[in-house]
Image (cartoon, rainbow, N blue to C red):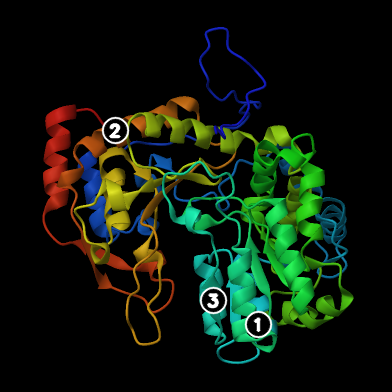
Amino acid sequence: MDFDNTAKIKFYSGETIPLELHKPRIVQKIHLAPIERRLKALEEGGFNTFRLNTQDVFLDMLTDSGTNAMSDMQLSAMMHADDAYAGSLSFTRMQKAVEEVLKKKYLLPVHQGRAAENIISKVYIKKKGDLIPMNYHFTTSLAHITQYGGRIVELLYDEAYKITSSHPFKGNMNIEKLEEVIKETGVENIPYIRMEASTNLIGGQPFSIANLRAVRKIADNYGLKIVLDASLLGENAYLVIQREPEFANSTMGEVIEAMTGLSDIVYFSARKLSSSRGGGICTNNSDIYHEIEAMIPLFEGFLTYGGMSVREIEAIAVGLYETLDEQIICQSPQFISYLVNNLVSLDIPVVTPAGVLGAHIDAMKFCEHIPQLQYPAGALAAALYMISGIRGMERGTLSNQRDEDGNEPVADMELVRLAVPRRVFTLSQIKYVIDRLTWLHENRKLIGGLKFVYEPPVLRFFMGGLEPVTDWPQQLLAKFKEDFGDSL
């Protein structure tokens, strides 16, 4: 079954390409540095793409967090922000947007998504060993849960771990395992159930409404809360419309309401959800609101700004309404689908079906000669940057954290994420990505492993420093010069 996004505009030539339903009004110049400078930048940054300076980056596909293109309506809204410390009208407008789009009455503002994770973990994880069942973890959600003594258990179906698959909802929670975990662990040791829309670390894969309903039924049976990470809610809703027959004729608003209505607490990073910067925690339960309320002034700021600029609050409000616009939300998933489908046709290993957030290259297969503890996804991300100026992100063992005994568990998948933020890249730039990945795949045996020279104790993938285990970067550079000559 083909899960490509249905094109409403057909080309007479028969070619299937995504058509941009927007026009650029403001542009930013980017630069493609020579390969020698790119290798030097890698060395200076400890072969960690997070530590690269943007002046050395051509196509920044590290993340969609805070990098989506804002709309003209968002920019104009920022000009009439209310700078009041307390009782700001900007917050009132954001609160109204949350109520009308996410259908939640109570809003607690935070400066970004991980701030919401910190506060929720602090409020609800009461004792060491508390267990949070989830479809799959995100790096910062895991870090905050473990920081307060909690543990996680990931409950995906086996299909989710298959790189090549046609399953439409690989982010679904395994309902049978969920009930088993609750019975074995005891309700008193489970603060809440977490669902992520969409599962970032396994390729941006969505869950279905039917699955969330089943989770809700079990939660109700055992008196448990559901906490929804809604950072990629819009894209998950879009894929529900594309892939879940019950919702084929539904609007974005109807699908979003179905998802948030099944959740007790909804939190989000506005850097993703509404193409701005900030975040929020929202609920319809006044008891939950008051349980969390005191944490906002303590960690974030007053209850009507939560550590955010009021200008960003205005942009969030507009961005939430724009999440209801299918033409705005569809652009990124359609470009991702185009990229993924082209890579599949070239036998370049990539997670399928195409999900949200970006294309996810299977580094385990791409660099099958590199042991997992030499971080093949990190090595592939470094190699791709060196030969192209494209900055992707490692999503594998390097992004994991060590256990309590200092052991290093290997990841379920070794992925390089090439994020495709909303309305940022042109089709020619996506074609450049395909071209350089094709060359690198043909020369993949030249890529070698990495090792840590500086390993931070928490979230090591952000600022950790690595170095190659051999001189493979120099060999790759030589091959690039042989094939491309003076070309950048």
Note whether residue 321 is visible: no
The location of residue 287, given as percent across then percent down, is 86, 79
Kind of residue at badge 3:
Ile
| Mark 3 vs mark 1, CA separation in Å | 10 Å
Circle 1 is placed at which residue position? Answer: 190
52 to 181, vertically: above or below = above
Residue name at image x 21 percent, y 63 percent: 467
Circle 3 is placed at which residue position? Answer: 152
Query: How many other residues sit within 10 Å of disc 3, few (<14), some (14-19) or many (≥20)?
Result: many
Residue name at image x 16 percent, y 45 percent: 445
- On the rendered structure, is 382 left or right of 239? left
Disc 2 to disc 3: CB gap under 8 Å: no
| Nearest to N terminus: mark 2 or mark 1 | 1
247 to 106, vertically: above or below = above
Considering the numbered disc 3 on the image, is that residue within a helix, a strand or a loop?
strand
Circle 2 is placed at which residue position? Answer: 438
Considering the numbered disc 1 on the image, is that residue within a helix, a strand or a loop?
loop
- On the rendered structure, is 122 left or right of 470? right
Residue name at image x 32 percent, y 55 percent: 377
Query: How many other residues sit within 10 Å of disc 2, few (<14), some (14-19) or many (≥20)?
Result: some
